[in-house]
Amino acid sequence: MATIPTIRSPLEFSKPQLKKLCLQASRGHPRAYEVLSQIDDELSEYNSQMSALDTQIVLLTFQRNQHNKYTTVSPGIETGIASEISALQIHIEILSSHRGVSYEHKRIISSFLSPLNRLLPNEILIKILVLACDEHDVARDLAPLGLASICHRWREVVLTSTELWSSFKITVSTTYQVPMRFNDPMRRDALLEIERLEMRLEKRINVYLERSGGHLLNLHVIDDNLKTPDTKIRLSYGAVNAGDV
């Protein structure tokens, strides 16, 4: 008969608890290492139990094949072996799911133990991010949004960096046509769409102006109606003070 081990649930963390652990890990707090040690114990136990269950499945399958080879197995025995194998497979799936949760917790917390996160001053990290964006031709107006989603520390750094929010672009499109006839039912929809786009643009600009603080701005105005790179108009205003806009 198959031996089914007692399966313990993985450590559970609420979002505030996980956030606190990540903050502790970024500061090298012993609590983060303690939790990671507990997660490693979980993973070791799950792997050991899964290996034991796999061994039992192999033995049961071998036993069934031997009976089928040399004797006629009664339907009851055949059904019993199949049920035991099925139960073992279900427990392996549960263990695999628990192991996945533990691995994810370990990945998130361990990422904050990186020397880059713990030891690098914010000022140097900002310079590295700015240079990386320029080196790889990353759109500077999109960079803050992407970088802020990497991890908790990067989000805090990005939100307080005026330089990363000092460059953005405005795309001017003259291809959007509004029906001229006043009673055209599509005219109202077109005007509403233009108003919606203008509101989104205004909101975005206000966010960048607010977060760029007193840093000099780089504003790119692009005419989207000119499709080829050679003819596309790009007006770059360097050294524009946010207070003057």
Image (spheres, helix red, strand yellow):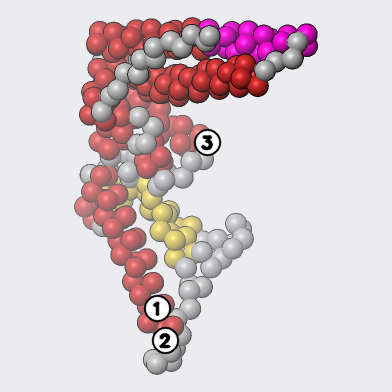
Residue 119 magenta-highlighted:
no
Residue to which mark 3 is pinned:
136
Q: Alpha-carbon neighbours of circle 1 within 10 Å: few (<14), some, or many (≥20)?
A: few
Q: In the rendered structure, which segment of residues is drawn in magenta?
A: 51-70
Q: Nearer the viewer, mark 1 or mark 3?
A: 1
Which residue is label 2 attached to? Answer: 185
State the mark number for residue 171.
Answer: none
Inspect the image, locate mark 2, and give the three-letter code of the amino acid beneath it. Pro
Label 2 vs label 3, nearer the camera: 2
* Furthest residue in direction right, as rendered: 69
Place of residue 70 in the rendered image (x, y in percent of width and height, measured from the top left): 78, 8
> Dots 1 and 3: beta carbons under 8 Å?
no
Q: Return the residue at label 1.
A: 189
| 189 versus 98 height, above or below | below
Q: Quadrant of the C terminus?
A: bottom left
Measured from the top left, where is residue 113 in percent x and y? 35, 15
Label 2 vs label 3: CA separation? 46 Å
**Towards the viewer: 204 or 77:** 77
Residue sitting at 44 percent across and 32 percent down?
131
Closer to the camera in the image, 117 or 173: 117
How far apart marks 1 and 3 lie (CA) works out to 40 Å
Marks 2 and 1 close (CB-CB < 8 Å)? yes
Q: Where does residue 81 sit, x and y in percent of width and height? A: 60, 16
